[in-house]
Amino acid sequence: MGFVFSKRRYMHQGVFPKDRLRFNRAVAEWCLRNASYCIEHEAMEEALRWDELAARVMSLECATLVEPELEKQLVKIGGHLKVQVPVTSYAVNVPRRVMHVLTLVNADGGHSVMLKRWIKLDPYPNTHSVVLLAQSAPVPESLIDAVDDKNGQIIKMNPQERMLDRAMRLREIVHTQADVVVLHTHPWEVIATAALAVTSAPPVLLVNHAAHIYWVGASVSDLILNCRWSSYEDYWTAKYRGIDRIMHLPIPISEPYEHDLSLDGEQASRETIHNNLKIPHSAIVMLTVGIGSKYTPLPDIDFLQAITEVLTSRKNAYLIAVGPNFDSRWISFRDRIGERVILIDKQPETSMPAFFESADIYLEGFPFGSTTALLEAGVRNVPCVLAPKVCAAPFTSDGIALEVIDKPEDIPGYLKRILELLDDEQKRVQCGLMLGASIRAHHCGNSWAKYFAEVQKNIPPKHEIVIPEPIDNVPDNLSFYWTAYSNAVSDDPLESTLSAATYYNLDPRIDTKIIMSSLLHRRGRGAKHSSVLSVVVELIRPPFLRSLLRPLIVGCKMIRSYVFAITGKRTQYGRQNV
């Protein structure tokens, strides 16, 4: 909260957070202008594509959490959907037909795991079905089984189909097969909002799984379900999204006895797991879980640097890291520490219990935490160390179940807490038991079902369209933090938008506003960014001239990459080593 952001500190990231926010906004508004032009000319498919590109850019940040203009455009597009739907009434009592709508699910993704547990834990005789708007990979078998057990079906749309056609199909599905719709969609998902932009649809609940960034759908959401029940979630939803239709439905967590303790598909004890991982029985094992980008360092906020101090001072401590992509920083870290650092690739849900059970302490990574993984460890009575307050919630874990443990003020406090737990077995046991009981009281079994019962009783009787009003932005000290992190792990917004527009066969209308924004956007050495030449080429309307100049752009980029490789500037200053 009190972290200071200065231009000098962020020079090596290639862009200052304030300027990057301004540029993100300029690119998003340019996309919205293109969408508005398409709507005026009744090119609704192209308008929907441009709105998705705008939402993708805005989801890179958290300064603006709601965009009235985008919501208005999606409602207009929804009004043009040519689909006949029957006039029907929806069940307001149990049993209900619940239709979960997702962009896509992965075998090891949080969306599919959360959805599967929700369906399994529902104590009522509701029917649960699932619509996947852009699923190309096979649907996880565990999710298929869960839906089958609740007499539902999985409807998988073709991601290559026109967005407008998918929106029309979704509208028809929810009108004929649902009493309530639950959105678990990606933050930039515009198809669902366009489809549900009609008052004859059933009530719509939106799962706020991306509380830390901008997302689409405020205009069509009758009820927001906050997953942590934290003060940040509720305050941000009301203050910076302008939505007071809030209820709480904690992330569902399976209790430990529901899992087999296994590794590589074999039944295993904790002792066997340690043997397989070559960990001495006298060692104290620390565990951290998260994809690699979540550990991308910011100035003075570096997880690997911090944990090096712990491992250096405590020779009996081991660290298991599950999920990072093991770039040069992780490899170098392991090489420095040696065999006491164990790197594990991202694992499917069925393999994770073994790693949680093998841990004596769970460490939340930073600058971006993994709440579900922390809860999975804590429910097994593993003591957890929360990320320090300099990595403010909601970018790290908080919530009603975690109020029983203190959040360190800063990184020295984070290290002190780890060392206390390493040195005191009784404190580890006490902390673990207290945390485990708290998580089970809110996130598991019958406890979770009580929250669900409250939601079920308070589902609005009808669907309404509410265009949000312009609202305050998130304070700079928080939005700058996230923008600095986002800049470190994301490509330049204009370059990626132009590439996507080309892929979608859109015809970008380049105007003076976007040109000036690109020219004025300050970029540090080695930063990935779109060149002015890229914009100039898009200005050239005749396709044959445009195609002639594209090789020049590619050549310039190749030369730039070659220079970076020779000089080492890319490694020193660029995104890959931030």
Image: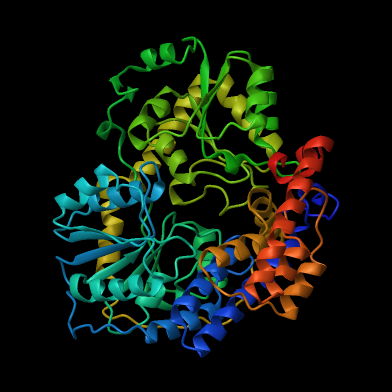
Whether residue 38 sits left or right of residue 452 in the image: it is right
In front of the other: 482 or 293: 293
Picture residue at 56% right of the left edge, 25% below the top: 421
Whether residue 347 sits left or right of residue 154 in the image: it is right
In front of the other: 561 or 265: 561
Picture residue at 25% right of the left edge, 72% below the top: 174
Residue 526: image x %, image y %? Answer: 79, 48
Residue 163: image x %, image y %? Answer: 40, 70
Residue 470: image x %, image y %? Answer: 59, 81
According to the image, what is the colour scheme of the structure? rainbow
- Asked whether residue 21 is in view, the answer is no
- Asked whether residue 199 is in view, the answer is yes
Image quadrant in which you'd find residue 479: bottom right
Image quadrant in which you'd find residue 15: bottom right
Residue 85: image x %, image y %? Answer: 22, 82
Picture residue at 28% right of the left edge, 32% below the top: 259
Picture residue at 25% right of the left edge, 43% below the top: 141
Image quadrant containing the N terminus? bottom right
Image quadrant containing the C terminus? top right
Identify whether 291 is placed above or below 475. Answer: above
The tally of labels here is 0
Identify whether 24 is placed above or below 567. Answer: below
Whether residue 451 sits left or right of residue 188 in the image: it is left
